Image: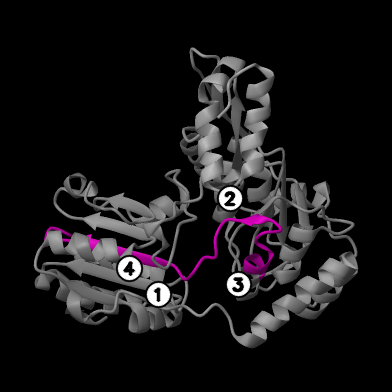
Amino acid sequence: MKIMSAGEFSLNRELEYGTPEQHDAVKAILASVRSDGDAALRRWTKQFDGVDVAELRVPDEEIQAAYGKVDPAFVAALREAAANIRAFHEKQKRQSWMDLKPDGTITGQVIRPLRRVGLYVPGGKAAYPSSVLMNAIPAQVAGVPEIIMVTPPATAGIEGIDPHILVAAAEAGVRDIYRVGGAQAVAALAYGTASIRAVDKIVGPGNIYVALAKRYVFGAVDIDSIAGPSEIAVLADDTADAAYVAADLLSQAEHDEMASAILVTPSLSLAERVQGEVARQLETLPKRAIAGASIRDYGAILTVADLEEGVEVINRLAPEHLELMVADPFAWLGKIENAGAIFLGPYSSEPVGDYFAGPNHVLPTNGTARFSSPLNVDDFMKKSSVISYSKEALLKNGQQIMTLARHEGLEAHARAIQIRLQKEGESVG
């Protein structure tokens, strides 16, 4: 892991979202599902997953049978995590409101849940039951009445859908599950087929084909985000434990060869100790090839003059995950402007948030924490403005409204007010 000054490090990373061939492939898949529906879903599933799918919907009996295929300790841990996630997101709920003024004017906001949401759960190389909870529970808390899930018919070499995924879905209250993945699943959610009705929003991670498909269907439906590779930054002083820091950096590096793991510190001694610890711990890591490539190509230890400069570097990085491994982390929390999730102190390791604490682990990546937030209950709500003007209020404010409308050259707007004022006997200029 390279040690360098923060000034030597390029803070901006341009990510290419797919090759021209991948873009063309995704557009072809989307068009075919839009025109051929279920037949296209089955055709692409056979081609990409090697599975003939007769019935797209997973029957309730298969979901229930999944409980017998997983360790009871997994179910117990999943339920505790789900309870924590639900409790955290319950605090995010907002209420509709109305403001009544003395002249009879009423303005307000009506907040409603989306009607139907589609959750994409990846298969292929790995299965992530925790992501099922993180995407489904906020939608449930928001009050979304229809939550459906799509996932490939085979996961990580397992014939059929991974039972841990089915159990996580059931625990999150999702029973409407379909065995289809990839860009074709995104197309089904966006446009609808005979078996899968279209949704209002698509959430959940996926490979490059899924990401591109979500990008192309945005507008027909809403999406959560186009997620880039995972990131972690650790701001640490000489009180930090080098073994802890190294382990947490590697916890993200093992996700993907393009994942980014960065230590920012004013302590050269800590930098050197972490460098050695990363190399030592990497040797016994099961995913050392992936983590090693990530550390080599996108990892760095950045030295700074002091923690103030370290905070400036962090705010420019705007990392997905940020750990504050400093003597008094709460004293520095208020200075952090850009980060998806902030972990305070030596015992708040990033996996605590990934799995169990309650805050959502679907976070902004690639510097988008400058303007984006973690997935939350608001992502599954929509808001309508409410305006009710009394006659008194219109007579009082009509002239000002017409003045503004005519300044913008919108005479019909002005006349819509004028006709009411004239009927009420007002003198109109």
- Residue 131 position by quadrant: bottom right
User: At numbered mark 4, what does the secondary structure look like: helix, strand or loop?
Assistant: helix
Give the residue at x 62% y 67%: 215
Q: Is residue 296 left or right of residue 139?
A: left
Number of residues whose C-alpha sits closer than 10 Å to that of mark 2, classed few (under 14), some (14–19) or many (20 or more): many
Where is residue 202 drawn, in percent x and y?
A: 66, 56
Q: Which of the two labelled residues, at mark 4 and mark 2, occupies the earlier sequence position?
A: 2
User: At numbered mark 2, what does the secondary structure look like: helix, strand or loop?
Assistant: helix
Task: Verify CB contact (< 8 Å) between mark 4 and mark 2.
Answer: no
User: At numbered mark 3, what does the secondary structure look like: helix, strand or loop?
Assistant: loop
Give the residue type at disc 3: Asn
Give the residue type at disc 4: Leu
Give the residue type at disc 2: Asn
Number of residues whose C-alpha sits closer than 10 Å to that of mark 3, classed few (under 14), some (14–19) or many (20 or more): some
- Name the residue tied to disc 1: 285
Number of residues whose C-alpha sits closer than 10 Å to that of mark 4, classed few (under 14), some (14–19) or many (20 or more): many
Is residue 76 or residue 13 the one in the foreground? 13
Quadrant location, the N terminus: bottom left
Q: Is residue 287 left or right of residue 389?
A: left
> Disc number at residue 232?
none
Q: Nearer the viewer, mark 4 or mark 2?
A: 2
In the image, the segment drawn in magenta is: 213-241
Residue 218 colored magenta? yes
Label total for image: 4
